[in-house]
């Protein structure tokens, strides 16, 4: 398969914050490529650095206590070193963001039409009436009924799902080539979530924009993503195509995530296999492989940080950070025929102690 | 039905909870009602887990708070072990509180940030007559029981992660050895791996202590894992009550089917193979619920009768009940044997669904034009 050149290249991205508790390494050595029309899902649990990764691309994590390393190149522009003025040009026009909570990210005292035209004004030289028509057209495109009337409504007059549609319309207003959506459906009901995901797919087909989807929900990932990056404690622990990740997962953390979800398409299990323990504090991460204290398959080599590299035979883009032999992994991850998880018979963890968790 | 149906612990009969909407500057006039819970009937048996699911705004949290008598029902009857408690006073409710406790959704908001863990868990014990050393010992045991270490009694909630806080919430609910625990979205604020830990803990506790759970959640896959029976709510009404597994293999109400179809399956191939029709629109405003069947504006199977007559809760085999004029996945024989359930709302029609003319295949809901958003 010949692949087009990536429009976004992230290499060894590292973000750390100096805090009272020490240096919090939120993102550590994250690399990925994004191509036009691709949907990349970044998956992980709270505090794994997935949102910081996404926000850093738009310079939204810049602050006096933040430190950046690595590169993020969008069409020859280096995002990490870009000036605020340069970023202002890029935001919305080239790369747009959709946030999780549409109520908190829309201006409550501004009509939604005005919020959309404001963004168009910032990037385009359009007469007012045309900008307004564009806003109406966008609202129609994301599936808001009677858009011509609703354009003069305030955010509180919309339901959660409709507000998220407004957010998407806003993000689309200047035809960006990259959309970053941070948990876009987490606050929504399943029926509405299904509608929004369908809309994302249609938009990708229409505009060929690339989408970075930050989520914790493997169901959403399976539904929409082309490629997946699994993050744990600031690092990508496994990366590959959708099928690689779901049918040949290489990292024990990915197994654990898959085992722990309740699902409606499989026979009900008596007990859910869990990942023992808690995620580490990002200010004080374990030496070597970060999963080591929680991993039942840990061995000597795990004290060294495993590189993110292709270990699977014949794998092209399927990389992981685990020292185990791929053949051994295939045996270890089957906790029941056809079922992937972390071995539930692993030794029990000691009672958890506070604050070595919460990042 | 439920293998553990010994006795009814809690009976909810035609319970309604309508919140008045007031308007006016000097004199408050009631200008309407939010029909949060509208004629709901179900029974909770000792030792079982009833899952209560629905989308946000369907009234499931209001119903669970009414069951706890944190709210007073505006109609109907609530019986605990046969005693009517629907309008009991705070004082009369004290013995009841010993028997039913609640675990809340948000482990950050439901623990007092200025109290130590020992105080939080011990409070209920003291309130119900526990003294000094005994309380301390029991708090230690409770913390251990939920997987925390007893040394943590003197810590504050902010020192714990979300999953640990939810464990504290569970310990607090267990303190006075209740029979019934109402769990309002106990895991929805937690990460999946932590979710699994809490679900396992809740199941262990139920096995060991013979607890009865009312498990409120919006996530049908979590509910399936924990429940013996599942009730599906929509706009204040029960749409379907079914033995847990049967709800997934044989959903009768189109709303249940729509919910199931909307859940993305964490398996790419199966997901692609599944023919999904996404249900259009969003739940309507509960101030002005639609006439007839409340689901008819979004239902792909709706006909004229659905707009006019509220469908009765109809009893099918296996204790499976559903309120729909055009039930899915039932044979004509099953339809003939169907009867009106005593749990049916009083305002509902009195005819069981007719064996339809050659069942019209589910109209494939095309790309949905989302319905009107509920204006504020």
Image: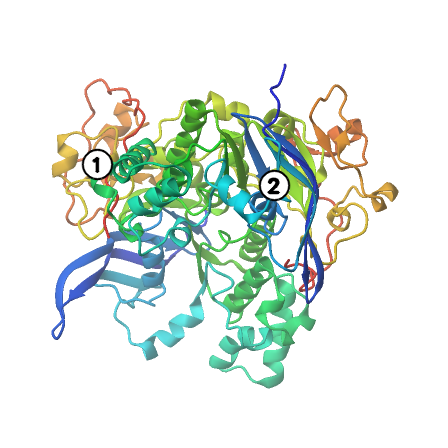
**Residue ranking furthest to the top:** A1
Q: Is residue A181 visible?
A: no
- Residue B205 in the image, given as x and y percentages of width and height: 56, 57
Which corner quadrant of the image does residue A122 belong to?
Answer: top left
Q: Residue at x 58, y 57 (%)?
A: B163
Check disc 2 and report its element: helix, strand or loop: loop
Q: Are marks 2 and 1 on the same chain?
A: no
> What residue did someone put label 2 on?
A79
- Relative depth, front residue between A347 and B362: B362
**Residue ranking furthest to the bottom:** B132
- Judge left or right: residue A21 versus residue A119: right
Please state which of the two labelled residues, at mark 2 or mark 1, is closer to the viewer. 2
Which corner quadrant of the image does residue B23 belong to?
Answer: bottom left
Q: Chain of mark 2?
A: A
Above or below, B261 relative to B210: above
- Relative depth, front residue between A171 and A355: A171
Q: Residues within 10 Å of mark 2 (few under 14, many from 20)?
A: many
Q: Chain of mark 1?
A: B
Above or below, B21 relative to A122: below
What is the number of the mark on residue B297?
1
- In the rendered view, how is the structure colored? rainbow
- Judge left or right: residue A164 versus residue A179: left
The quadrant of the rendering that contains the C terminus of chain A is bottom right
Q: Residues within 10 Å of mark 1 (few under 14, many from 20)?
A: some
- Residue B209 in the image, given as x and y percentages of width and height: 55, 60
Q: Residue at x 28, y 49 (%)?
A: A111
Q: Is residue B150 visible?
A: yes
For the residues marked 2 and 1, what is the alpha-carbon distance in whole angstroms? Answer: 48 Å
- Relative depth, front residue between A216 and B150: A216
- Residue B138 in the image, given as x and y percentages of width and height: 61, 74
Q: Residue at x 76, y 49 (%)?
A: A347
- Residue A38 in the image, given as x and y percentages of width and height: 54, 27
């Amino acid at each position: 398969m010949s692949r087009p050149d990536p429009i976004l290249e992230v290499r060894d991205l590292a973000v750390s914050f100096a805090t009272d508790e020490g240096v919090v390494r939120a993102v550590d050595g994250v690399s990925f490529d994004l191509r036009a029309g691709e949907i990349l899902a970044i998956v992980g649990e709270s505090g794994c650095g997935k949102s910081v990764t996404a926000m850093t691309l738009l310079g939204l994590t810049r602050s006096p206590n933040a430190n950046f390393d690595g590169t993020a190149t969008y069409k020859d522009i280096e995002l990490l070193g870009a000036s605020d003025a340069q970023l202002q040009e890029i935001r919305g026009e080239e790369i747009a963001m959709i946030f999780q909570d549409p109520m908190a990210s829309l201006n409550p005292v501004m009509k939604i039409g005005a919020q959309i035209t404001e963004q168009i004004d910032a990037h385009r030289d359009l007469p007012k009436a045309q900008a307004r028509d564009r806003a109406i057209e966008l609202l129609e495109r994301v599936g808001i009924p009677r858009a011509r009337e609703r354009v003069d409504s305030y955010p509180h007059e919309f339901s959660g799902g409709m507000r998220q549609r407004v957010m998407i319309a806003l993000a689309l207003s200047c035809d960006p080539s990259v959309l970053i959506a941070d948990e876009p459906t987490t606050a929504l009901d399943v029926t509405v979530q299904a509608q929004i995901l369908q809309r994302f797919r249609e938009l990708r087909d229409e505009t060929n924009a690339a989408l970075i989807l930050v989520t914790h929900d493997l169901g959403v990932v399976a539904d929409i993503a082309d490629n997946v990056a699994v993050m744990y404690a600031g690092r990508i622990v496994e990366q590959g195509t959708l099928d690689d990740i779901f049918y040949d997962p290489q990292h024990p953390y990915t197994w654990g995530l898959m085992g722990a979800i309740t699902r409606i398409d499989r026979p009900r299990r008596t007990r859910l296999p869990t990942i023992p323990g808690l995620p580490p504090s990002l200010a004080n991460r374990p030496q070597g492989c970060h999963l080591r204290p929680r991993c039942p398959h840990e061995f000597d080599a795990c004290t060294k940080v495993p590189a993110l590299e292709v270990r699977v035979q014949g794998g092209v883009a399927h990389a992981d950070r685990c020292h185990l032999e791929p053949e051994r992994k295939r045996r270890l991850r089957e906790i029941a025929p056809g079922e992937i998880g972390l071995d539930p018979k692993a030794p029990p963890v000691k009672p958890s102690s506070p604050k070595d968790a919460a990042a | 039905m439920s293998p553990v149906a010994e006795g009814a612990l809690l009976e909810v009969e035609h319970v309604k909870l309508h919140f008045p909407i007031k308007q006016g500057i000097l004199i408050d006039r009631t200008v309407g009602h939010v029909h949060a819970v509208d004629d709901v009937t179900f029974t909770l048996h000792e030792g079982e887990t009833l899952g209560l699911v629905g989308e946000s705004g369907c009234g499931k949290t209001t119903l669970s708070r009414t069951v706890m008598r944190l709210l007073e029902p505006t109609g109907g009857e609530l019986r605990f072990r046969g005693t009517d408690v629907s309008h009991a006073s705070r004082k009369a409710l004290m013995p009841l509180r010993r028997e039913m406790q609640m675990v809340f959704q948000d482990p950050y908001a439901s623990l007092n940030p200025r109290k130590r863990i020992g105080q939080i868990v011990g409070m209920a014990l003291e309130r119900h007559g526990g003294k000094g050393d005994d309380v301390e010992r029991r708090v230690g045991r409770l913390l251990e029981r939920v997987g925390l270490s007893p040394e943590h009694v003197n810590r504050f909630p902010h020192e714990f992660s979300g999953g640990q806080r939810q464990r504290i919430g569970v310990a607090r609910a267990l303190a006075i050895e209740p029979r019934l625990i109402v769990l309002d979205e106990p895991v929805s604020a937690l990460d999946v791996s932590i979710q699994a830990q809490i679900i396992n803990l809740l199941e262990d506790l139920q096995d060991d202590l013979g607890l009865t759970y009312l498990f409120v959640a919006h996530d049908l896959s979590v509910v399936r894992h924990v429940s013996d029976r599942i009730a599906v709510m929509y706009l204040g009404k029960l749409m379907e009550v079914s033995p847990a597994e049967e709800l997934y293999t044989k959903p009768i109400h189109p709303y249940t089917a729509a919910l199931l179809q909307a859940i993305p399956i964490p398996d790419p191939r199966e997901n692609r193979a599944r023919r999904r029709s996404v249900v259009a629109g969003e739940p309507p405003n509960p101030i002005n619920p639609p006439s007839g069947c409340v689901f008819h504006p979004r239902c792909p199977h709706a006909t004229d009768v659905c707009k006019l007559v509220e469908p009765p809760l109809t009893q099918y085999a296996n204790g499976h009940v559903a309120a729909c004029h055009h039930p899915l996945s039932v044979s004509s024989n099953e339809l003939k044997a169907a009867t009106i359930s005593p749990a049916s709302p009083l305002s509902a029609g009195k005819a069981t669904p007719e064996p339809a003319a050659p069942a019209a295949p589910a109209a494939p809901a095309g790309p949905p034009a989302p319905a009107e958003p509920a204006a504020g």
